[in-house]
C-alpha cells in the first residue's frame, strides 16, 4: 500500500448481498472500487450484529486490493490477531471502544496491519492529538454507527481541523456514513481522501448486473474530485 491523498472509493459490503460476498467484492473492484470496506458489528458496541473474523477470512481471497476492516466492537484487543490473521490490510478501532485505545493501536500495528482510529459523530478531536503518530487512518463517522443507509451528519468542521492536525503525516482521512454524490464534495473539500459508501454504491445493481455499481462509483468520485 503506497500512501496517496488521491480520492479513494471504498464500497461497504454491509449493503451487498450477504449470501454472495465473494462475487460482490469482485464485482465492485472490477467496477472501479479502490478499497473494500468491511463492517464488523457486535450487537454490544453498536445495536446490530454483522459478522466476524471467519467471514473476513472467507472474503479475503475475493479481494485483489485493500481490505479495510472497520471494527464496531468492544472490547477490541482480544480479536486483533484474528482479524490480522484473516488478512485485513487496515484494522480500524473506535476511540470510544475502551479506555486503552493507545494500546489497541499499538497492538494492531504489532499484528502487522495498518492502524485506523474511528470517531463517532459525538466525539471531538481532543483525544486524537496524542495518537496521530500511531495511526495510518482516521475514520470520521458521518452517521452513528450500526446501520447502513442512514442520513449524512455534517462533520465538515471536524474534518477540516483534523486535516490541519495531520499536517504532513501519511495519515488517511476516511469518511463513513451517508456518503453520496451529493455529500462527497463537502467531505473531499474539507480534506477527506477515503470515501466509504454502502447504499450509494450498491443501489440498482447486483453481482450479475454490476454496471450500476460502476456508474455509482464514478458519480461519487467525479463529484468528490470536482470539489478539490
Ligand atoms: C455504519 C457503517 C458504514 C455504513 C455505510 O455503521 O460503518 O460503513 O454501512 O453505509 P451507507 O453508505 O449506506 O451509509
Ligand atoms: Zn464502516
Image: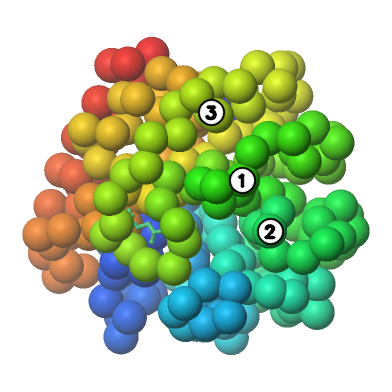
In the image, is 93 to the left or to the right of 111?
left
Q: Nearer the viewer, mark 3 or mark 2?
A: 2
Per the image, the residue denoted by label 1 is 123
Q: Are marks 2 and 1 in contact (CB under 8 Å)?
A: yes
Q: For the residues marked 1 and 3, what is the alpha-carbon distance in whole angstroms?
A: 12 Å
| Image coords of residue 39 (percent x, y) | 49, 67
Is ligand 2 less than 8 Å from the beta carbon at label 3? Answer: no
In the image, is 225 to the left or to the right of 41?
left
Q: For the residues marked 3 and 2, what is the alpha-carbon distance in whole angstroms?
A: 18 Å
User: Among all residues in the image, which is located at the extreme front?
Assistant: 122
In the image, is 139 to the left or to the right of 24?
right
Per the image, the residue denoted by label 3 is 159
Question: Crowdedness of circle 3 by 10 Å Cα count: few (<14), some, many (20+)?
Answer: many
Q: Secondary structure at mark 3?
A: helix
Per the image, the residue denoted by label 2 is 96
Sequence-first disc among 1 and 3: 1
The answer to which quarter of the image holds residue 152 is top left
Amino acid at each position: 500500500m503506497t500512501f496517496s491523498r488521491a480520492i479513494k472509493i471504498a464500497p461497504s459490503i454491509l449493503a451487498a448481498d450477504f449470501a454472495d460476498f465473494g462475487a460482490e467484492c469482485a464485482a465492485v473492484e472490477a467496477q472501479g472500487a479502490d478499497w473494500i470496506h468491511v463492517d464488523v458489528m457486535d450487537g454490544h458496541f453498536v445495536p446490530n450484529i454483522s459478522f466476524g473474523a471467519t467471514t473476513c477470512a472467507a472474503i479475503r481471497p475475493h479481494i485483489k486490493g485493500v481490505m479495510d476492516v472497520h471494527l464496531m466492537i468492544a472490547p477490541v484487543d482480544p480479536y486483533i490477531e484474528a482479524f490480522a490473521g484473516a488478512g485485513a490490510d487496515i484494522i480500524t478501532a473506535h476511540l470510544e471502544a475502551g479506555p486503552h485505545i493507545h494500546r489497541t493501536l499499538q497492538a494492531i500495528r504489532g499484528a502487522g496491519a495498518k492502524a485506523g482510529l474511528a470517531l463517532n459523530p459525538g466525539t471531538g478531536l481532543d483525544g486524537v492529538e496524542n495518537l496521530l503518530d500511531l495511526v495510518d487512518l482516521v475514520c470520521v463517522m458521518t452517521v452513528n454507527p450500526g446501520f447502513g443507509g442512514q442520513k449524512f451528519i455534517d462533520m465538515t468542521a471536524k474534518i477540516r481541523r483534523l486535516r490541519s492536525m495531520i499536517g504532513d503525516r501519511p495519515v488517511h482521512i476516511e469518511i463513513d456514513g451517508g456518503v453520496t454524490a451529493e455529500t462527497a464534495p463537502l467531505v473531499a473539500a474539507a480534506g477527506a481522501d477515503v470515501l466509504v459508501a454502502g447504499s450509494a454504491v450498491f443501489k440498482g445493481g447486483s453481482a450479475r448486473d454490476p454496471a450500476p455499481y460502476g456508474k455509482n462509483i464514478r458519480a461519487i468520485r467525479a463529484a468528490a474530485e470536482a470539489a478539490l
